[in-house]
Image: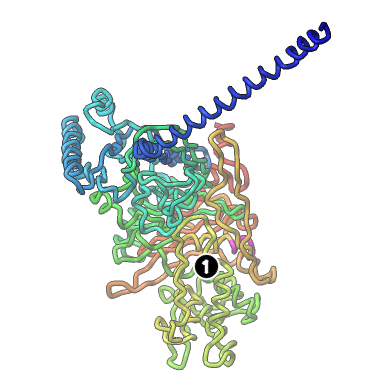
Amino acid sequence: MNNFLGRNVKGDKDNEPKSGLNLRVNLFFFSTFVIFCVIIIRLAVIQFVEADTLTEKETGQNTKNIPLPPARGDILDATGTKLAFSTPVQSLYITLQKDYSNATEKSRKNRKEAEQLAQKIADVFNGLGDPIKKEDIIEAMDLDSKKEHGYYPRRIKMDLSQREIAYFMERKSEFPGIEIIEESKRTYNPNTIAVQTVGYIKSFKHTESLKEYDEARKDQKDSGLVYTPDELVGVDGVEMSFQKELRGKNGYKVVSVTPGNIVDGVEEIVPPEKGNDVWLTINKQVQQTAEQAIMDQLDWVHHNPVSGETHPNALTGYAVAMEVDTGKIVAMASMPDYDTNVWADGGISDKDYEKIKFNYQNGTITPISSGKSGHNMESTLLLGSTMKPLSVLVGLKEHLFSTTTPYNDVGIAYFGKEKKAVRNSQNHAYGYLRTPAEAIEHSSNTFMVEMVGDRLYSKYKNKGGTYNKGIDVWDNYMKQFGLGVSTGIDLPNEFLGRREYMPDKNGKFPQTGSAQGSLVYASFGQEGKYTTLQLAQYTATLANEGERIKPQIVSKITDQNGKVIKTFKREVLNKTDEFDKSYWNLVRRGMNTDVKSAFAGFPYDFARKTGTSEQWADGKNRDNGVFIAYAPRNNPKLAVAVVIPEGGFGAYSAAPIARKIFDAYDQEYGLDGVPKKNKQAVNP
């Protein structure tokens, strides 16, 4: 009995935990069943009841990145003077709030409201004294989103006054979608220093004709690289060639948009990064001296007769100063110039463009829109007698004569079967010239005709079939010295010159009638038109004894903390065919043209060559003033080239400008390596 009872008690205790476990398991499965039922019911509700609402909400929460343009970096001269810089301004923008497509009655009503808003904005500006047309505001609003997506802000007016800012900020609720946004405005040095070299800017939306921005117009995934319509971009000069460095990187604003591409809210803002600063090799003191010297000399030739006449049609002038050892361009003057601030807002008025359209580009590198003389002479001219040092080098290298070959100059030379005559300037007969160096010094046309052009033609007369290879030989020498090819400078729109000694596509020589005539006239500077920069590089190549170096317009690039991130060093483009040392010595000695009136008291021995190229215009030949020089003669530091279209003899029109440039450089840097301004400061 006891055993029986004891077994029952024990059995009850063993069964008790099993019953509790079963209960918990049952509760778990029941709860799981309930949860799954709730989920299934919720999914059914979402799918069949709330689907349209959620789809609209999901679409309404699509986000877009709106680029925020950075402030451009500064452009500074070699002394740290800012030539172009960005200043913060406040601008009025509007973001579209509704559908203005005119497709429905509601959108047409919206459009009418937008036009009324435009009139209201116009009334505000007109009342505050800075008129703007309603039609211009409507165009800027881009109601049909033809120019940009609907969620992009539209700029209504840049550079608001304090009164305008206060008015709109106080009444923001009255103008749906407007906001005041800080952006940067490009400002140029009011002293107009090297303006065509610095270049100018336009709004990105106005660059349709520039292939350089084709890639930028394509959609890009990186928001930091996307251009905004009103962003300022470089379209000429350093502003353009160093666009990437100056631009910096966009920030962006993440906005949620509706199905109609209307902004519904701002999710995030990432600020832009300002661009880097570009430091030019231009020295403002030397540059301003060159610019003023050109304008003074133009006035001088207008009122002072040279060889019996004044030169009132000399209206333009160009000068380049290039360091022989480094390639740095310390002055690049194209005159007359203009105030680049006419482009500061990203465009230019028709009235302002009419004033500058003939001289807003850099005449030292292009003849396009860079000024013309009274008889339409461009900045790209025949070199005249400045070609003669190279002509003699070609003659020596081709063994047409030697360094000791004498020549009897009778003032006239003949060539070809027709016995065409070429005379020296003013019919001078220089008599017995002991060496080719004297032919350079006295600028003998007849020596170049008989000893270089005609002999080069004869040397290759029976070679190459009917075509005279002498033309190609001449062309090769020109290119080795930088004439007819790119100088390599980091500036856009460089013109390569006109090699008029070359035959046309039909093998004819329209300028001279024959290969012989082309070589003869080219030998004394009449068959090739080149830029002032090419002329300066050619002069530096003479000074460097055949080593052609790249003209450097930028010395370094720094970030916004002043850290140097890139420097530009001396760069050799090519070395000419090997010339005997005696050839260089002869040419250096021959570059000794008489310019005493312009260089009186100049403390350095220097190599120089004047030129007076003749070009036909309006019924007669017009004399252009050309001058090249480098100093000192035996330890060259600076090469200078000056061109004055219709200026008359180069010794009187161009050489005085070069003298002032040399003096200014001597003050700043020292032609002997010792800046004279420092010596004057020590010894007042």
Q: Does the magenta stretch include residue 356?
A: no
Would residue 566 appear left or right of 321 to someone viewing this image?
A: right
Is residue 60 something one can see in this rendering? no
Q: How many labels does the image show?
A: 1
Provide residue 458's location: percent of width, then percent of height: 56, 88
Between 597 and 560, the residue placed more toward the observer is 560
Residue receiving disc 1: 485
Q: Residue 559, can we see it?
A: yes
**Image colouring:** rainbow
The type of residue carrying mark 1 is Val
| Residue in view at x 48 percent, y 50 percent | 331
Residue 623 in the image: state x and y as whole percent.
Answer: 37, 68
- Compared with 423, 329 (above or below) is above
Q: Give the range drawn in magenta.
A: 541-546
407 with respect to 375 (left or right):
right
Badge 1 density bin: few <14, some 14–19, many ≥20, Cα 10 Å:
some
